[in-house]
Structures are given as C-alpha cells and as structure tokens.
C-alpha cells in the first residue's frame, strides 16, 4: 500500500528540502490567514527546482478571484486545495489538480473523487473523529488531516484507511517553523504503518 504524504505549511527552503529528503509526495504552501502564511513570490522562491515528482500545493481558504489569480500566475502550483464550495466560483485551469476540503461536520451529499478531510479549523492540530472519517473514506480518495503526528498516524491509518495523510503543526518546533527530525519521524511512521498493513 503506497500512501500519499503531504507536509503542509512550508515557510523556508530548509523545510521544503527536509520534506522532500524524508520522502514527502507533496508540500503545501499556505496563502490564508495563518502563522504559516507566505506570499506567492516566497512560495515560488523556496520551491524552485524541486523534483517534478513532488506536488506543490497552494492551500487557500475562500479566496476571491484576484487572490487565486495572483497565486496561479506567480506561484504556478500543481494543486489547489481549498474548501469544496470555493471551486464553484474559481476559474481553475485543467492542468491544476483540485483537492477540495471537506470539514468535519459538513453535510456531504456528493463526495469528490479525491479530497482532503479535516477539522473545522485548519492548522490547529485538532484530532477528528476517525470512525466518521472512515465512513467517508470508503466513498473517495481521502487525504486525512487534523491532529496527526508520528505517535498516532499508524492508528489513524488502520482505522480510516485513507488514500493519503496531511500534517503541519505536529512537525514543527514552533508555529510556522518546521522541524526536519519531526518530519522524518512522521514519514517513517507512515511508511512503517503502511508496510505492516500491506503484509497483513
């Protein structure tokens, strides 16, 4: 079982390099109110020349047309991640992957083929109800977020069986400051857990 791992909230090149060297499949750059918020210019600079196999994700929250257009034109992400309803009013080119966010407690009639599932507030380290998440994970390719860390991600994977995982605050030494060792420990925990699941 190969699981997508996203490390979110990149604020400097050291964090980007640490995530890639540890084996991350995607790195996230926040363009919403957050201790991890950076400009499109900064995101472009710190992600320059990274492997094309690593997805660069623009993480936004209710962006208007101009805010999204600025990120698109300057940063040129591979993926846009924002709340599911936001996509209704945004012009997203077909070359950009869409990762709609569904939040715990949302009323969900139609589940996108691939989506991020997290708590009410992003980047707060709030653990969600894994049993509810597991029900939703059966309906699409879920990237599970919310309160994951190296100590609990194995249990979360066993319970929810998501397509991927997303972490931010648990791999930091301070808000907005990524810790290379914590990134490595988290990804190692994910790979160890998925290896055990594939063997069982």
Image (tube, grey):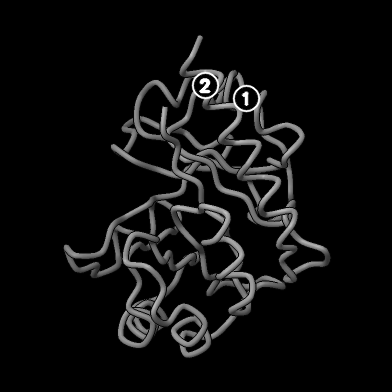
Q: Nearer the viewer, residue 190 or 90?
A: 190
**Residue ranking furthest to the right:** 174
Taking the image as shown, residue 97 lies to the left or right of residue 2, namely left
Q: Is residue 58 above or below residue 150?
A: below
Q: Position of residue 86 (x, y in %)?
A: 38, 60
Residue designated by label 1: 130
SS at circle 1? helix
Which residue does the image show at 49% across and 65% down from the upper left? 59
**Residue ranking furthest to the left:** 94
Which residue does the image show at 51% across and 61% down from the upper left? 20
Quadrant where the N terminus is found in the figure? top left
Which residue does the image show at 56% across and 19% down from the upper left? 196
Residue designated by label 2: 134
- Assess whether mark 1 and mark 2 are in contact (beta carbons under 8 angstroms): yes
Which residue does the image show at 58% across and 79% down from the upper left? 13
Q: Position of residue 12 (x, y in %)?
A: 62, 79
Res 37 → quadrant? bottom right
Q: Position of residue 161 (x, y in %)?
A: 49, 23
Taking the image as shown, residue 118 lies to the left or right of residue 152, namely left
**Residue ranking furthest to the top:** 200
Q: Would you call the spot at circle 2 few (<14 residues within 10 Å), some (14-19), or many (20 or more)?
A: some
Q: Would you call the spot at circle 1 few (<14 residues within 10 Å), some (14-19), or many (20 or more)?
A: some
């Amino acid at each position: 079982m190969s699981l997508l791992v996203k490390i979110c909230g990149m604020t400097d090149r050291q964090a980007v390099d640490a995530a890639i060297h540890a084996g991350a499949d995607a790195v996230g750059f926040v363009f919403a109110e957050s201790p991890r918020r950076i400009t499109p210019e900064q995101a472009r600079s710190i992600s320059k020349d990274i492997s094309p196999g690593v997805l660069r994700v623009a993480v936004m929250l209710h962006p208007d047309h101009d805010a999204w257009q600025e990120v698109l034109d300057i940063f040129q992400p591979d993926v846009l991640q924002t709340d599911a309803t936001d996509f209704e009013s945004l012009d997203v080119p077909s070359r950009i992957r869409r990762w709609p966010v569904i939040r715990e407690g949302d009323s969900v009639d139609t589940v996108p083929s691939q989506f991020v599932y997290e708590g009410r507030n992003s980047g707060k380290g709030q653990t969600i109800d894994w049993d509810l998440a597991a029900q939703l994970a059966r309906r699409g390719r879920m990237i599970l977020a919310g309160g994951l860390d190296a100590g609990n991600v194995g249990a979360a994977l066993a319970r929810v069986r998501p397509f991927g995982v997303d972490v931010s605050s648990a791999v930091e030494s301070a808000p907005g400051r990524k810790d290379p060792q914590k990134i490595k420990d988290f990804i190692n925990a994910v790979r160890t857990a998925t290896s055990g699941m594939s063997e069982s």
